[in-house]
Structure formats: structure tokens, C-alpha cells
Image (cartoon, helix red, strand yellow):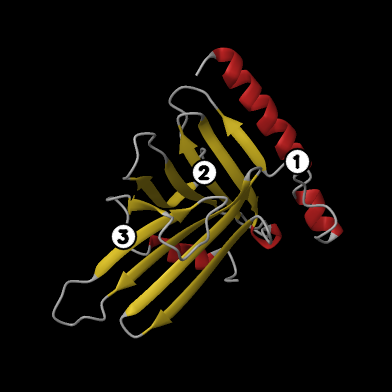
Amino acid sequence: MTNALKTAALAATVTLASACSTTGTLPPQTQAQNRASPYSLDQSPGAQACKAGEDEVASFMSVDDDFGYGVAVCVAKGSGDAEDRIAVIFAGEGGNLRTECVASACDGLIGYSRYTRPRFTELKLKWSTPKGQHTIVETFDAELVDAPPENSVRHYWPGQEAGTAEGGEMVPNPNKDALALMTLEKSLPSS
């Protein structure tokens, strides 16, 4: 990608990000917490997903395309009465696109849900970007007693419907446990 195209893409992202605000749907104190755009793009070489002071609670990498991208989920623990801050980073060749919010102000920006039945768990992480909503669905299936448990992760990007075969297959970070997204339950209410 040429520098002119990168500059144009960054300008378009910044324009879209500033158009995506949280005003009108959240209480005034929450709007003040998220007054700055909840989206940011870091194109610096070797950009790290999580910032200093943030813990990476889960991360996933693509496995089925030549482009190569990853998703990291970071939590900055609030001190004292301060709330935790949640960030989802979509990292690809164009840089790291962050969506972040204070835990109580994540409605519509970042959402988490869990479905559990005996020997089966499904976790969903949804987050908004200037281009639309992304969803990661992680399942852990141990229903077949004679077979090893299956852990699968699929990523659905804008224009795809979660739960269909359209999603791109991803693999969890081998340094993280299966179902690491459940760590979000400590910071982010389940939707």
C-alpha cells in the first residue's frame, strides 16, 4: 500500500471514528468519560496491542488467509473507585484499530455474553468499529464423552452474520487458556 493510500485510509478512519460517538444513548457522566472517540488507529511499526498498564486477557490469530490479522482483548484495572477500562484491538497490516471504553459505558461498543450447558460453553465478544460490528464466537464442546474436547473460534466481520459458516477461523493464543474471554466477566457485565 502506498503512503498516499495509507494517509487516505487513516483520514477516512479518523473521519468515521469522529462520526461514531456515544452521545444520545448514554447518561451524561458516561458521555463525558467517552467524549474522545472510542476508536484509535496506531500504524507505528511494531505497535503493541495492549498499552502499558493493560493486561491481555485473550488474543486470537487468523488461520485461513494470506492477509494475517489478530484480535487482542485488554483490560486496564481501575484503582480505587475508578472503573476498569476494556479495549479490543483488531491488528492487521494497516495497523492496530482499538475500540475502548470504561466498563459501565461499553453498551453498544463492546459486549460479552456466555451460554453454558453441561459440557458445552459458547462465548461471544462483539465490538464496534467505524466500519461496523465484529463478533468472535468461541466454543468449547466436550459433549462427546469418548472424544477429546473441541475448542473453536470464529471471527465475523461487518457484512457477515454471526453463527454462519461465513466467519473466518481463528486460533486462540497458545499462551492463553481456552475460554480466556471469561476473564471479562470480572470487568464487563454479560449482555
Percent across and percent down for residue 156 are 48, 54
In front of the other: 102 or 181: 181
Asked if the residues shown at circle 2 and circle 1 are in contact, with their CB atoms under 8 angstroms apart, the answer is no
Earlier residue among tags 2 and 1 = 1
Q: Name the element at disc 3.
A: loop
- Tell me what residue is drawn at x 56 percent, y 49 percent: 87
Q: Is residue 130 visible?
A: yes
| Mark 2 to mark 3 CA distance (whole Å) | 19 Å
- Tell me what residue is drawn at x 18 percent, y 82 percent: 145
Q: Quadrant of residue 107?
A: bottom right
Task: Indicate the amino acid at tag 2.
Answer: Ile
The residue that mark 3 highlights is 177
| Mark 2 crowdedness (10 Å alpha carbons): few <14, some 14-19, many ≥20 | many
- Residue 173 lies left or right of residue 73; in this view the side is left
Task: Indicate the amino acid at tag 3.
Answer: Asp
Q: Name the element at disc 1.
A: loop
Residue 96 vertical placement versus 119 (above, below): above
Q: How many marks?
A: 3
- Residue 176 lies left or right of residue 126; in this view the side is left
Percent across and percent down for residue 90 are 50, 42
The residue that mark 2 highlights is 89
Q: Quadrant of residue 38?
A: top right
Give the label, 2 or 1, closer to the camera. 2
The residue that mark 1 highlights is 36
Image quarter hosting the C terminus: bottom right
Earlier residue among tags 2 and 3 = 2
In front of the other: 84 or 87: 87
| Mark 3 crowdedness (10 Å alpha carbons): few <14, some 14-19, many ≥20 | few
- Tell me what residue is drawn at x 46 percent, y 22 percent: 45
| Mark 1 crowdedness (10 Å alpha carbons): few <14, some 14-19, many ≥20 | few
